[in-house]
Image (cartoon, rainbow, N blue to C red):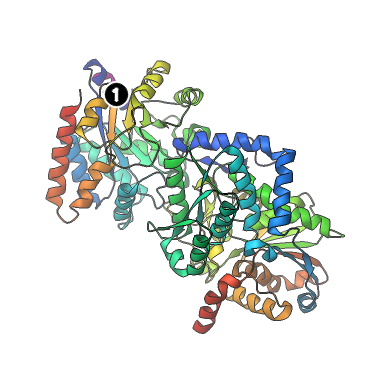
Amino acid sequence: MNKIDTVFNKLRLANRTAFIPFISIGDPDIKTSLEIAKTLINNGADMIELGFPFSDPMADGKVIQKSYERALKNTISMQDAFDFIKRLKAYRDIPVIFFTYYNPVFVLGSKFAGGAYNAGVDGVLIVDLPPEESGEFTNYIKKRDIYQIFLLAPTTNTPRIKYVLSYAKGFVYYVSVTGVTGARGTLPMSIRSEVEEIKKISQIPVGIGFGISSKEQVKEISKYADAVIIGSKIIQFIENNINDKSKILKEIAEFSSNIKSSLS
Amino acid sequence: MKYPDRMGHFGDYGGRYISETLMPAIIELEEFYKKIREDKDFKKEFNYYLKNYVGRPSPLYYAERLSDVYKSEIYLKREDLNHTGAHKINNTIGQALLAVKMGKKRIIAETGAGQHGVATATVCALFDLECEIFMGKKDVERQKQNVFRMELLGAKVNPVESGSQTLKDAMNEALRDWITNVRTTYYMIGTVAGPHPYPQIVRDFQSVIGKEVLKQIKKLPDIMIACIGGGSNAIGLFYPFLKYDKVKMYGVEAGGFGIQTGLHAASISGGKPGVLHGNKTYLLQDEFGRITEAHSIAAGLDYPGVGPEHSYFADKKRIIFDSVTDLEAVSAFQMLCKLEGIIPALESAHAIAYLEKIKKEIKGKSVIINLSGRGDKDMHTVSDYLLDI
C-alpha cells in the first residue's frame, strides 16, 4: 500500500487532519533545507511536500519564486533532489510528495520514475500537468508505487471535478483561492461548500492549500478537510532570517507545532 | 490530417500544460472560438477592421534592385505598412473582437520589445477595453519609446522583476495575473504559442497574410522565407501554402552571437523539446530542464521557445529551420535600406539576411519574404550596434 494511503487511513481513524508543510529543496542551501525538513517532521508534519526549484514557476507567488531563486544559486540537479529525499527518508519515513513543474521531469523521461522511486517519493504533484496531458507521465511511473497528485480549483465545475477525481489517487489537492501560491489574510467563504461537493463525489481525502497562513484558518479548515498544506508562510521564515539559520529553525519549529495543535 | 488535433496537439507538440485553475477558462475559450471561427458576422467584422483600420491588404512588392543583386525574383510582403508597423495587429484585432464577444472587459498581454504590447494597447483603445501589459524590467529600460506608446494608448505597463526580467518572465507574470483574475480577464497571447487553442487562434488570424499572397501572385513561388521568434508572422505567411509541396519554406531563427556560443534565440536550431508556458515545443534549456535566457539583437525574437506547429513541421522537415547571426541581420538591415529605401524591423532583417545564405539556390527562382515589420523602433539598437563594431 502507498504510504500516503496508510497515513490518511490512520488519521481518519483518529479523526484528525493531516499537516503537510511545503519547502523548496535547497533553499537556502541543501544542508539547511534538510534541517528545516527534519524540524518540520519533529514538530508535527504528517507528510511533507518538497518543491524542485524551477526557473519559471508560473503558478507560484513571490515568496516561492524567491525561494526557488535562492535555491537555484547552487544549481540543484534532479539527482541532488533524490539524494535529499533519500537522506530525509532515512531520518524518518513519512510520505514525501514531490512538487515540480513538468519540464524537469519530461527531460528525464522514465529515468525520473526510477530515481524518484528509489529515493522514496510517494506522490508527485506536477502543477502544469492536468489529467488531459498526464498520459506520458503515467507511462513513466507505471509499475512503480508512486501516485500522481491532481489539483482542483475554485474554477473547476462539477463535471470537471468528476473527471479529475477519476484520475485522483492518494488525495486530491484543492486550491483554496483563485490565484497563485502565497499567504493570504482571508480565504474565500466558499471553500467549505466546494469541499463538501467533492466529498459527495468521492471518498478520496481532500487536502487544502494555497493562501493558508494562520492558526485560525487551520482550525476552521480542519473541520472539513483531510489535510492542510502550508508553504509560503513557512518559507517566509527563511526569507526573513536569511542570515540566521538558528532563528529560521526556531521560528519554523514554533509555527509548525502551533499549526499542529490547532488541527483536530 | 488537420492540425491541431482535438486536444490541441501538433503531433508530439502543443497541448495544454497549465494549472487546473486555468483549465476551465481555456476550455471555455476553445468552445467559444470553435463556434465563432466559422461565424460569418465575425469574419465580416474582422475583415472590416483589417481593411479600414489596419490598412489591408498589404502590398506584395517586387523588390527590383534586391532581385538584381541575387539574380532572382524577390517579393516582399509588406506587413511593415500595417497600422502600428507590424503584423502583430492582425492577431490583436481578432482576439479583441473575440474578447468583446466573450464579454471580457479586461485584457492582459505579455510583450518583449513592445510590439505586441503596442498592438494590444491599440485595440484596447479601439474597443474600449481595460489593458495591462507585462514587460520584463530589462525590456522596459531598453524599449522606453514603446513603453511610452503603450501608456499614450491608455495601457498600464507593469515591469516584471522576476527571473531574467525579459519576455519569458513577462509571460510568467501574465499567466500569474490570469490565474488570479481568470473570471474577468482575457489573456491576449501575441504569438502562436501557449496552451491550446492559442496557437490555433493566432495562426488563424495571422493567416490573412498568406491568404492575401495567394490572391496577389500569378504563380506559386519557389521559396518562402520568414523570421521565427515565436513564429506568428511565419505561420501566417506559410500556413495557406503548406499544402503546396513544391513551395520550399525557410524559417530563420535568431542566431545571436552564433549557435555555438550559446548566446542565441534559436529554439529549434539550438534547443530541444520541452514544456513551457502551456505547450510542448522546442526550448532553450539546460540539462536539468530549466529554461535558459535567449539572446538576439532583435528583441521580438528574444524568446527561448517557439510555436508548437513549427516544432512539428521542423521534425517533418516541411519547414526548414536555420539561423542568422546579429551581425548578418544588421548587414541585411543596411542593405535593404540602401537598395530598396525600406527600413525593416531587425526581426524581419533576419529573413532578408537569409538570402545571402542560400544565394546559389535562389538564382533564377521566385522568392517571397515576409517583411513582418518596420524598423523605426530599432534606430537606437542599430546605431549602438554599429558604434560598437
Q: Position of residue B202 (x, y in %)?
A: 63, 49
From the viewer's side, name the closer residue of B346 and B119.
Answer: B119
From the viewer's side, name the closer residue of B266 and B234.
Answer: B234
Q: Residue furthest right?
A: B218
Does A58 appear above or below B103?
A: below
How many residues crowd around disc 1 within 10 Å: few (fewer than 14), some, or many (20 or more)? many
Tell me the residue at 26%/38% (across/down).
A185
Tell me the residue at 69%/56% (across/down).
B53
Q: Is residue A247 left or right of residue A20?
A: left
Check if residue A8 falls in the magenta segment: yes
Q: Quadrant of residue B179?
A: top left
Report helix, strand or loop for mark 1.
loop
Q: To which chain does the residue with label 1 belong? A: A
The answer to whether one can see residue B8 in this image is no
Tell me the residue at 69%/39% (across/down).
B37
Q: Which residue is mark 1?
A: A226
Bounds of the magenta segment? A5-10
Q: Which amino acid type is shown beneath numbered disc 1?
A: Asp
Q: Is residue B366 left or right of residue A163?
A: right
Tell me the residue at 65%/75% (across/down).
B332
Q: Position of residue A143 (x, y in %)?
A: 43, 29
The answer to whether one can see residue A58 in this image is yes
Q: Position of residue B126 (x, y in %)?
A: 60, 53
Q: Residue furthest front?
A: B128
Query: The N terminus of chain B appears in which quarter of the rendering?
Result: top right
Does A228 appear above or below A38?
A: above
From the viewer's side, name the closer residue of A135 and A65.
Answer: A65
Instruction: Tally the marks.
Output: 1
User: What secondary structure is the magenta-colored segment mainly?
Assistant: helix
Q: Position of residue B113 (x, y in %)?
A: 52, 64
Check if residue B353 falls in the magenta segment: no
Q: Is residue B89 left or right of residue A187?
A: right
